Image (cartoon, coloured by chain):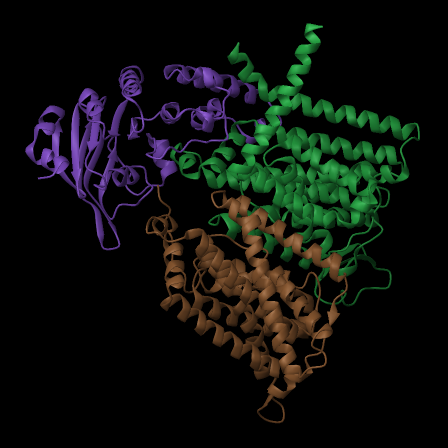
Amino acid sequence: MNVLEVKDLSIQFGGLRAVDNFNMTIKKGQLYGLIGPNGAGKTTVFNMLTGVYKPTEGHIFLDGEEITGKPTIKINQMGIARTFQNIRLFGDMSVLNNVKAGLHNQIKCSLWSNLFRLPSNFKVEREMNKKAMSLLEVFGLDKFANHKAKNLPYGEQRKLEIARALATNPKLLLLDEPAAGMNPNETAELMENIRFIRDNFDMTILLIEHDMRLVSGICEELTVLNFGSVLAQGETSEVLNNPEVVKAYLGD
Amino acid sequence: MSKLKTMRQSTRKKCFILLGMLIAFGIFEILIATNTLSNQMQNLLVPMCYNIILAVSLNLVVGILGELSLGHAGFMCVGAFVGAFVSKVLGVLYPDLSKWIVFPLAFLIGGLVAAIFGLLVGFTILRLKGDYLAIVTLAAGEIIWNIFSVTYAAVDNGKIRFSLGGTNIKGLSPSAKQIATGAQGISGIDPLSSNAGVRFAIAFAITFVVVWLVLNFIHSRTGRAVQSYRDNRIAAESIGINITKYRLITIVLSAFLAGIAGVLYSHELGVISAKQEVFGYVMSINILVFVVLGGMGSTLGSIIAAVLLTVLPEWLRVLNDYRMLIYAVVLIGVMLINNNPTISSYVDAFKNKVKSLFKRKNKAKEAQ
Amino acid sequence: MSFLNTLFNGISLGSMYALIALGYTMVYGIAKMLNFAHGDVIMVGGIVTLEVMQNFVSGMNPIVGALISLLAAVIICTLLGVVIEKIAYKPLRSASSLAVLITAIGVSYFLQNVALLTFGSKKKMISFAFLDKFDIKINEQLTIQGSTVINIVTMVVIMILLMLFIKFTKAGTAMRAVSEDNGAAQLMGINVNGTISLTFAIGSALAGVAGFMFLGSYAAIGAYSGTMPGIKAFTAAVFGGIGSIPGAMIGGLLLGVIENFAKSILANMQLGTLVDPIVFIVLILVLLIKPSGLLGKQVREKV
């Protein structure tokens, strides 16, 4: 079954066609990689998938339902969560509260119950704490629960972003350069985490990455973008050996 | 262990603040009862209360939502006028009605009308942010008090009549009772009680409930959603938080509470008139000084700053002349200390030194 | 004829707004901050003009005296602007816009209260009778007042000089570069801090001129005189499109004319006090309908 189907997606910024005729299909449970040189339009694709940009042409289907051009909030509620290339945490909130904010639409109670501390408020807090702590444990972040998010080390911040995205209970998780700025040890640990999420949360994951060891290590299929259009698509090993791809990365 | 701590931290802080308020209240009441409190000080108790409410409610917008509002006094203005209007009109129409019905109604209606104004302002600023948003809240505040400065109201033959304009309502019968008279405002508003101790008790009770509500709001699912918008709008949207809704909720709640403070204000003073110094942006900035000095986002800080800045200028008359100048220096100084990396690193180093000094003393004591 | 009178008064007021709006728009375009204290620098300019005219140049030819006091106002305002920038704004270059705006409000308060303590709480009056020489009499009913003539001429001359400066000088090019992208400008070897300071200096010099014009138009000044013209001129800058120099001119003139017509209409309804709210309503409407102003451009947020 296809979790994500992208058909003929294009976007135009002024005179520049940043993404042109982009097609991609991701099956349930897949670990899918989107790679390409800098400025190829990878993050722009993410921004269209999550409703930050409205595509000029084309269609996006999540689980068979069209989500093209819907607002970010709605798209998240329908099941796409993401992380950001330049980390966007809630810096002045605690690590725990970052994840609890992610649980916002999963565990609900009314404003009145918040204001007047009705019983449902306490029930919600208990449930949220339990769920959030278990998510933090997956990434070994539980010991930082009370720290401000902005005081975390860089690598831990990236993990917290993933935990927060997972808290929204998505069908599809988009990771924008999750290993950026990590050392080889941290990257190896991250790869374990990503696999663990896929297996234990029954997740489908699409990631943008420059670290080829991570890409070849965990991605099952790849799409290569170059100057806004698809250069190659298919199984990881095949794509990485494709002479066109090698040329795009290393130059002539 | 650590998990337990996590869950109790905010609750503990809340109890600490509320308990501290109760103790302070108890001390003041004892001082009033034993006649040890000077008249001057007694007259400051209720102003302390409404300043606390104004500060914590503005802190909701500035510190928790992260938007600069320069029109908070406008909402207070609405509360002050509507509250005074309600209690005067009820006094004229139903002279026998108990004060225990009139005053709660005045507070409720004053707060609700202020909340409606908050909603209007909230809709106006939905698409704005930063400096533009701040200047629009300033504009809205100015428009609000200016409207009240040309509002006339009277009760004539059991009917309420309004007029918006430069002159009084035309064709009033001689028996008509004037309520609001344009720039002269409303006068002869009944005090909540003639006894200073009781007045303070009522004002304190309201303030206490307001602080409790505000703390509940901040440390809740709703409060987290609001703070996520403050910290990163794009990320908040990406996790499905309806930021429009939470911005509106915060602004409306803040306006409601400012309205309550306004009702308290008008009933304490007995006379109000719509003027720049009282309800214009000058007042809004004074409230902002409470919030900034207390540390943006900190409810406890807002409370302490509001109390200090109410009491200090009255104690030290010299300070009163320079009050506004000091406010200015506070605004600039706090911003520089908190936001300049070089200066804040000096301040942090100093803080740590002081802390370690205290620690050493404690250790020395233990050793003895 | 009263229509034309109102129109000319509006243009005169609008010229002053345009000049103040220039200060806002340049600083906003380049330092990306709302210099809330700009109005109060104008107040300082007005006070300096008044003090110099009353105490130092009273024996001279009034026009020479006025020019000397104008020069004094410009010099002092420029210095003041540079000092304010250095002490209060420069340390906050990387801070949030919230922090910068609060600091600017603090500076505004500071200037007002220093003026209050030194200058006194009462407004002081001065006569600019010599401006009558510039009156243009069109017919029996309609005379364009000297102050109006001076305001319009000054505004147009300064506007043209400023556009030439920004278009054709090296410093002007640096300003354009910094306003476009200060990171990239820095990489190209442009002294970004210096450019921002220069912008403040120019903006404050203009505030000195505006202070002089204010005194010429109203013949009175006090510690709080700068605030409202400041806020209204910011409205004018937003109206015209912030960051755009011709926008400041158009916005200022339009706002001045709107304000004067509103004033004459409201006066007939005995609602003269509601002039300021009218200006604020204009501001809100502009921001609701076209936040980028008449000549401004839209900016996309990067994700």
Say left or right for C254 vs B89: left
**Taking the image as drawn, is residue C291 in sight?**
no
Q: Measuring 40% from the left and 53% from the top, which residue is drawn there?
A: C191
Q: Quadrant of the C terminus of chain A?
A: top left
The tally of labels here is 0
Q: Is residue A142 shown above or below C10?
A: above
Q: Is residue C260 above or below residue C78?
A: below
Can you tell which quarter of the image residue C232 is in? bottom right
Residue at the left extreme of this rendering: A243
Is A250 located above or below residue C266 in the figure? above
Q: Nearer the viewer, residue A232 or C29?
A: C29
Identify the chain drawn in green: B
Residue at point 90%, 39% (across, down) = B39
Q: Which chain is brown?
A: C
Task: Residue C158 in the image: state x and y as whole percent.
Answer: 49, 73
Tint applied to chain A in the drawing: purple
What residue appears at the point 34 percent right and 49 percent down from the top-left corner?
Answer: C184
